[in-house]
Image: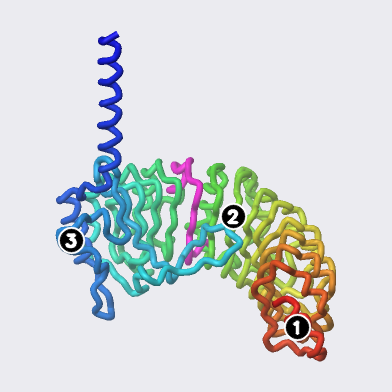
Amino acid sequence: MRRKEYSCNATVAVVLVMLFITQIGGFYACIQQERQILLNFKRSLILSDDKEPLPSWEGDGDCCEWEGIACDNVTRHVVKIDLKNPCSVFFTVETSTEPQQPDNEFCLPADAFAEEDFSRHLSQLQHLTYLDLSGVAIQENPAFLGSMQRLRYLSLRVYYAPAASYTFPTGSIGNLTNLRALYLESLFFANVTDSSWLAPLSSLQYLGLKAVDLSMPQAHHLFKVLNTLPSLLHLHLPACSLGQVSSSLVSDPIFPLTNLTRLQLLNLAWNGLNQDSPVLHAFQNFTSIKVLDISRNFLSSVPSRLAKVHNLVKLDLSSNNITVLDPLKNLTSIRVLNLNENNLNSIVPFWLGKFKNLVRLDLSRNILYGPVPCALRNLTSLTFLNLSNNHLNSLPSCLAELKSLIHLAIVKCWLSKIKELYLAVIVML
């Protein structure tokens, strides 16, 4: 019995010691060599306003507590550097129905630049799994990336001149086979020699390319590569000149893209697309999509293929030239619908009353006229309603039944029934 008790007590002691080590691991200071590497990297950053970048990065304190830094709880190696600019988020991966607010307490200015020796410092941090430098404009070839085999998240903002003599190390990124998320901004494909550089990243789930000219011949093969990434969940292609892609590209047998069956988010904003743009054909069968952004294009009508995307939860068609909404009338799963700044020039469609899942509805900056239909009283989940900058002539008191409504915007609406409006607002309050 004593032997069993001794064995049991020894086991408990070992477990307690391990738990104690785990619990106090967070209080260990970071590795001194890595603190110095981070300080050297900080010195390579330049701000045009002469302010000191990253003010918390100083002294003899624990560098694991510095802004934008995270360490492994046990080894204390730096595993995360997050220097994104929350005041100018490049790629929004949030699918929430609530608007995102920037964290103004930690906000790198957009004009933060890295000097030439920055990569020499970062290349020594071989335990990194997360690297976000989108708040820093990179002005040199980040060839060191190829050695960071542990990376699972990578976000860079490249500051290359189009006439630069060097090429972007896409081959190095292709070696990062553990990547799950890759976001690149302002990459010039004129500096890319290997058009298959994404192909090895078969486990990639989140891909974002912003301000990358995909209409260039060097970029055409990228679409074929996308079809080989069946794990993709989010695809961001804003400001990629997709409206200039030639019809010869989408006549390729691989179109439409059929293998991206898991895709849930697609961002095609700022691309100069119209309803006849051939590249839209490539994405016609993406019925799994839940979040779709085609804002700031030249669409004069809602793409008819949207009628088949019954899983849509969030749809942004703002800042287009849309006049008719009929293809949307059966997409009642939508929770967020943004139609701001279009050319809707009729009455508010009564069928919107069927959208009982709607949480946010923005119809502002259109040419809507007439009364707001009482059918909207059925939108019992609605918390945000923007009808401002239209020509509406009444706001019926029946909208007082929208008990969840928190934000109602009606500025610059031509309302003739002021008393009716007054009563409706008073009831809602």
Magenta stretch: dominant secondary structure: loop
Q: Position of residue 424 (x, y in %)?
A: 77, 80
Distance between mark 3 and mark 2 Cα atoms:
38 Å
Residue type beneath disc 2: Leu
- On whether residue 20 falls in the magenta region, the answer is no
Instruction: Decide if residue 45 is in sight here.
Output: yes
The first of marks 3 and 1 along the sequence is 3
The label shown at residue 40 is 3
List the residue tagged with mark 2: 265
Give percent across and percent down for residue 303.
73, 63
Please tell me in which quadrant of the rendered image residue 346 appears.
Answer: bottom right
SS category of the residue bearing label 1:
loop
Work out which quarter of the rendered image holds the C terminus and state it. Answer: bottom right
| Residue 404 vs residue 232, the one in the foreground | 404
How far is the residue under mark 3 from the one under mark 1?
56 Å
Q: Earlier in the sequence, mark 3 or mark 2?
A: 3
Which span is picked out in magenta?
197-214
Q: Amino acid at mark 1?
A: Ile
Left or right: residue 59 versus residue 185 is left
Q: Amino acid at mark 3?
A: Asn
Establish if 333 lies above or below 174.
Answer: below
> How many other residues sit within 10 Å of disc 2, few (<14), some (14-19) or many (≥20)?
many
Residue holding disc 1:
367
Residue 147 seen from this side: no
Queried whether the magenta region covers residue 212, the answer comes back as yes
Please indicate whether residue 163 sits to the left or right of residue 63 in the image: right
